[in-house]
Image (cartoon, rainbow, N blue to C red):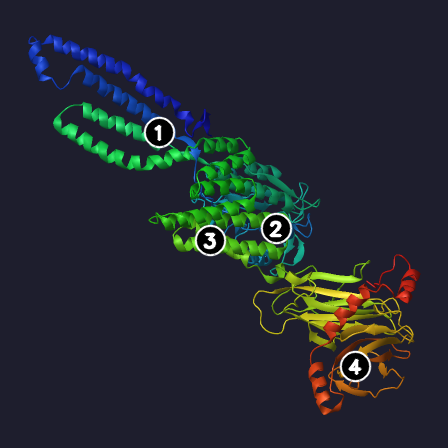
Amino acid sequence: MIEGIGEVHFANGRLWFLLLLPVALLPLYVWASLFRRKVERSFSGQSLVKAMILGKSPFRRFMFGFLVFLGLEALGVAILEPKYGLKEVTVRGMGIDIAFVVDVSKSMKVADVVPDRLGATTIEIVRLLDQMKGNRVALVPFAGLAFVQTPLTLDYEVIKEYLASLRVTEMPVPGTAIGRALNVAIRALRAEEKKPRKVIILFSDGENHEGEPEKVAEELAKMGVVVFTVGVGTPSGQPVPLLDESGKVVGTMREKDGVTPVISKLNEDLLRGIAQKTSGKYFALTQAGGVAEEILKELQAIEKAEYGSRIESMMEDRFQYPLAVAVFCFLLAFLFAGGALRTQTALLCLFVFAYPFSLDAKGFFERQHPKVKEALSLIQSGQTGDGIKLLEEASQEMPLRPDLYYDMALAYALASDYEKAISAIDKAIEAHQSLKEKGEAEPQMARLLFAKGTILGQWAKKMEEEKKGAREVRDKWRQALDALSMALLLAPDDKDIRRNLEIAAMSAYPPCYKLDDRFEPNNSLQDASFLEPHPDTNEVKEELFLCPKDEDFFKLPLRAGESVFARVLDPQEADKEKPKPADVDITLLDENGASLSGPAKSVFAHAKGAQKTVYYLVNHQGEMEDGIPYVLSAQIIPPCPAGDDSFEDNDTKEGAKEIKDGTYALRVCPADDDWFVYTEKKGERMDVVLKVQGDEGPLEMEVFSADGALLDARHERQKDLNLVIVSLPKAENDAIFTIRVYGGGNEGFYELSIEKGKGGGQNNQNQQQQQNEQPQGSQTMRELLESIDKNEENLEAKDALRSLPKDYAPIKDW
């Protein structure tokens, strides 16, 4: 325990009595002086005696005694280990070492908990592993004999596999030896290594048949190992089942009389005693519920205490200074002892000793800046925020001090402000790189990079606790991995860097299934996940993730007459006006999995006659290493007339709407013709082109000149598009044309284009073919959706919307 005297703290304050020892020598010194004087007076020739001891004057003797006394006092102060000022603390581990000690004796097959004691133990350990991050874990199963099934590892999947394979019938020695199991766990944890913290979690019913586990627990307590015990079963117990070689229950075990069943009861007293002796805690695993969450809280408390202690002990050891005073006093005393040879030797030692000390004095006194000392005091008292403010002020007065920025980073980390902590450590790295003295650059830079990687790891763990997105957490772990990798290159023998690098590497590249979205599993048509449109906007927008060698299937119900336009977008640009498509493809499927459209970046579906469910497949064409994030966006378009375009009301020739050169994404409803007016400029020769998807319509187009004459139209088929093309005559003056698009009793989405032409012929057809080889569906539907959103004059649409119930939403059959 650290005891404080003013602003100075003493780590070994309990040894204060050492300061009294030099005082106890004072009577001896006085007695020796008196005895010396008595001896001198006993000689007859006192003048001759004084000449013989000329070098031993009373002043020299006094200074010799005084310096020895002062040196002993300074040595005592050094032994007390004074601490003050900020210390350049190295952040160590990001986790703890845990050994799961599992009882696999025959009594663990008792079914007083579901499914049985061993099964319940396995379930709880798996739950713990699923929630733990960054802790190394070992597995030690035992019965009459214990062994290390899995040494310390970060691969939790291996632990789970071995847990699933544990069989009571496969244990070589029957019985229950808890003490022996704890001893094996000590070796598995490498308890001789003080860091990181060691924890044993014992799952057992407490029926111990040999050994003295309490004594082993006392030894564990001396080593600083904490033991959490989990009592599996009930105090009343149940009969122990009799198993055959395959592990199947074939009866009940009996006592020697062959009649009385063997009852196995939970021994809570033994397990509770083991936990108490090691400052651990006892948990009861019964029918009432699991213990994984409670144990996890205790483990997190140990992690935070372990991490916090390293951050909070920011006081610098200063024992070297009183020790230096002690050595200095002893050398001076040696000088006053007299003699030419002694004097020369003492002066040489003083020069050698003082030279390096003077070089370090400047750095020491700069560390004792008043604001730094006050900041330390505030941080020690728990006022981290105020302490950080003073450190920031000190950094303004002492710029380009990597050690000061380093301390600021640790203080920010203590306050869990990891963003500012990383900013501070980056400044420390930048300041260090700008220094002229590069002689010690590598070890210093390794320490800074190690601190950065460790703080990033702590940040990632906090994000996991806050249930942040798995991919966001993964990216933070990868930043930590990068920093720790650079640190290891500079300090390849550093064990702390290696250990944290191992932790970061396991978390930076987790199995892809842990990063996948909430719709999983949806890897087949039968497992297709429902997409739920927003009730107000009829829009679907989901941030998703596609793992390597995986496919995502979705389904979306449509009401009769509804249409849907779906596309896959890059998550970084999904909210932009013209977003970039994702590096995946979407395919429209029927209910049997047959492709209707795609693969492409967007697909369109229409429920013409009755309600239907559309299916989508999202996959990636080619190899990928790390999975691909994407946004699936789908917009449901209401049936006619509510879903008509923004040019309505243009159902008659008199209501025709003016259009200009360009392309328009439009929709025609049953018995609802679309009329337009176009003015061809003098000297131009334009083509009017109607483009319709193959499964829409069929739709037709007519173009009339100003005198009412019907112009010739030609029909073409290109890929999945039906085209109707009317070439306008070259205009001698501005000429007005009327355009009619109709479907009779049909409805459909179409694209109407006014583009430059040559009045017909093969050249015009070739030009038209080149233009139509570009994909049109995505552009057409996007423009249509925009036009629907801007439909302010569509009276029929407004009437239809008013007639719908207020709680209108697409029918959902899930």
Gap in angstroms between the C-alphas marked 1 and 4: 97 Å
Gap in angstroms between the C-alphas marked 1 and 3: 36 Å
Left or right for 755, reference 652: left
- Residue farthest to the front, as pictured: 733
Task: Name which of mark 2 and mark 4 comes first in the sequence.
Answer: 2
Image spot of residue 445 (x, y percent): 41, 49
Left or right for 273, reference 634: left
Image quadrant in which you'd find residue 522:
bottom right
Gap in angstroms between the C-alphas marked 2 and 4: 64 Å
Say which residue label 4 marks. Answer: 688
Say which residue label 1 marks. Answer: 78
Query: Quick one: SS at disc 3?
Result: helix
Q: Residue at x 10, y 13 (%)?
A: 50
Specify few, some or many for label 2: CA neighbours under 10 Å numbering under 14, 14-19, or 20 or more.
Answer: few
Q: Nearer the viewer, residue 746 or 97?
A: 746
Say which residue label 2 marks. Answer: 131
User: Three-letter amino acid code at disc 4?
Assistant: Val
Label at residue 484: 3
